[in-house]
Amino acid sequence: MLLDWYLWIKALHIMSVIAWMAGLFYLPRLFVYHVERAGGLEPVATLEIMEEKLLRVIMTPAMIAAWVFGLLLASVPGVITLGAPWVWAKLLGILAMSGFHFWLARQRRLLKAGEARLSGRQYRLANEVPTVLMVVIVLAVVLKF
């Protein structure tokens, strides 16, 4: 049954991952702007709204969809072999990406409460995390190492 829907599930998985990744790339950049304007003359209320909506309306639903469609793909017989190292590399990358997502959600709450301790430079560095994870995941899946 799932095999009949395999290409649709794969397409939906790819679209979900793209939407999720877009948010993972953009939210830390919003944090940079937020931190660098906090305490200054420029209000951060607009940034807080953008951060909250990006996380709640786009990123979290996209992450959930990516997980659901990914698990559906993995359950299609013959798609993965649990003994293959690439499967575990991808899984570790996805778990790290999910952990980063939840870390960003916590940072948003801290920023809103005025309790964030990271600088704009640190958020700029955090902005590189999804890129590194994406490289690991894509290489694992495509090269099947």
Image: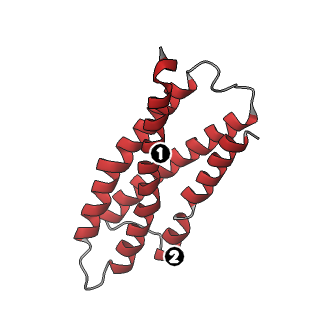
User: Which label is found at residue 17?
Assistant: 1
Q: Is residue 112 above or below residue 15?
A: below
Q: Nearer the viewer, mark 2 or mark 1?
A: 1
* Quarter occupied by the C terminus: top right
Quadrant assignment, res 92: top right
Q: Residues within 10 Å of mark 2 (few under 14, many from 20)?
A: few
77 on left or right of 70:
right
User: Which label is found at residue 121?
Assistant: 2
Q: Residues within 10 Å of mark 1 (few under 14, many from 20)?
A: many
What residue is shown at x 59% (from left), y 52% (from top)? 134
Residue 125 percent coordinates (x, y)? 56, 69
87 on left or right of 25:
right
What residue is shown at x 25% (from left), y 85% (from top)? 41
Q: Is residue 44 above or below residue 83?
A: below
State the SS at label 1.
helix
Q: Compare marks 2 and 1 and give the one earlier in the sequence.
A: 1
